[in-house]
Amino acid sequence: MKIARALISVSDKTGLIALASALSTRGVAILSTGGSAATLRKEGIPVQDVSMYTSFPEMMDGRLKTLHPKIHGGILQIRTDETHSEEARAHNIPPLDLVVVNLYPFRQTIARGADFDEAIENIDIGGPAMVRAAAKNHAFVTVITDPAQYESLIEEMDRHKGATSPDFRKTCAAAAFAYTANYDSAVSAWFAQQCHQIYPETLTIAASLRQSLRYGENPHQTAAFYVTDPTQSGVASAIQVQGKELSYNNINDTDAAFQLVSVFTEKPAIAIIKHANPCGVATANNLVEAYERALACDSVSAFGGIIASNTPLDGPTAEAITKIFSEVIIAPDMNNEAKEILAAKKNLRVLLTRAMPDAAGAATMIKSVAGGLLVQSKDNILLDSKLLKCVTRRKPTEQEMKDLLFAFTVAKYVKSNTIVYAKNEATVGIGAGQMSRVDSARIAARKAQDAAKALNLETPLTQGSAAASDAFFPFADGLLAVIEAGASCVIQPGGSIRDQEVIDDADKAGIAMLFTGIRHFYH
């Protein structure tokens, strides 16, 4: 289908002049609306206003301009249908061969905190109608909705002597329907919020493809990475400054690492993640010390891990990191010294986010099941030390209290069931994802013993440590395993029918125990 007449109406004017110039030099007549027409005319590109074309003025503050039979008849007419052709001739409706439209910036408008009335005015009506009409009639009409498509459009026209092929138009139509669906999803989600509907009757999800992945969790699985909210700081919006392409597992693990370190805001923090579980987490007065303390928790598992920092990466930390093999580093930024050091490790993936996510910010978590979705709010509750309840005769010391809070914070990001031992605000043993909490306690203790051997310590660092459990101890055996490992204090949600039995055993051992009233299951 040769392109002789185009309609251009865009809010995002990126690449507009270059596109219109290319169309005009190829003999395409251009119709346009308001701001787009003014932009083209200013550059000396021949353009006809839609209002002149339809002989009907723009009305109602621009709400009514393209919703006209001469526009939609030009888009929707089936060129091979004689009845359509006769009706078009009778009413002077020439065909429109190309529709270039992108919509009012609704997402950007609500993102900057616009009030209700301004948001409503940024809900596009005429634009989606034209896009959908052109996509429906893609057998005859080419529809372009993204400036990134402009170059391929001109290349396509040059290949086909000013025309476009059926496959090209079909591909563009698919993109157009996805574009309007994405837009409508944003409007729908915003309206649900305005009506205080946390879980609306119909859930719509919009996401944009960031990259196709080589494979999923395993080589026989296909995979892709989609972005739902590019305004959130994290792996989805991060800039990869070096290294190989990210894999499915890299992305999943990197997100887990970065979400964990975002909780720590007072001191530099490092988290080392392996298979979505922390194998070492620490805070310190400087970043390199935080890294070394995190690594000491489980240096064996850290090999090939993901490293996240809550502060810009510096040279000494970069130097320390490069002593072992790591898959990914994610940080808000890095200085020139760190950049030079890491550049020598060409395969090491380095992601910079420019900012940290809000650990307490609201978000929706979605998990698929066969034939459905599980949707919940993010576990964003932050522990308030004032709400903790000491249930034992012995109270925790000031340092124990710091370690208890640290350990329970880390436990939130470890797969359930979990036990975390911490000392001086660094993990010294982590037991994750076991069916029995006793097994998690023992695994964490064994890892601490292995770490002690590696550090040439006489006793493991679990001696005198704080232990955290993500959920209550259903029996006293889990607590006894923690005590056996050397913990001097414990923090747990409480709420078991056997709480008193657990408390009694804690008192017998002379340890302090706090109840949080908060559970942190993470499956």
Image: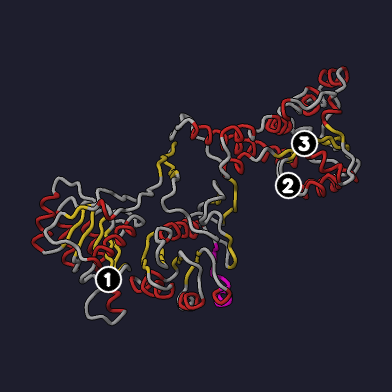
Q: How crowded is mark 3: few (under 14 residues within 10 Å), some or many (20 or more)?
A: many
Residue 403: % across, % down: 28, 65
Residue 331 seen in render: yes
Task: Left or right? Give the position of 497 relative to 69.
Answer: left
Secondary structure at badge 2 equals helix
Q: Nearer the N terminus, badge 2 or badge 3?
A: 3
User: What amino acid type is highlighted by mark number 3?
Assistant: Val
Secondary structure at badge 1 equals helix
Q: Nearer the N terminus, badge 1 or badge 2?
A: 2
Secondary structure at badge 3 equals strand
In the rendered structure, which segment of residues is drawn in magenta? Answer: 339-352
Kindly report the distance in space between the C-alpha atoms of the residues bearing marks 1 and 3.
65 Å
Residue under pointer 3: 99
Residue under pointer 1: 448
- Quadrant of the image containing the N terminus: top right
User: What amino acid type is highlighted by mark number 1?
Assistant: Ala
Asked whether residue 115 is drawn in magenta, I would say: no
User: What amino acid type is highlighted by mark number 2?
Assistant: Pro
* Marker disc for residue 147: 2
Asked whether residue 340 is drawn in magenta, I would say: yes
Q: Which residue is at 45% across, 66% downward?
A: 307
The quadrant where residue 53 appears: top right
Q: Nearer the N terminus, badge 1 or badge 3?
A: 3
Residue 319: % across, % down: 49, 78
Q: How crowded is mark 2: few (under 14 residues within 10 Å), some or many (20 or more)?
A: some
| Residue situated in front as seen by the camera: 441 or 109 | 109
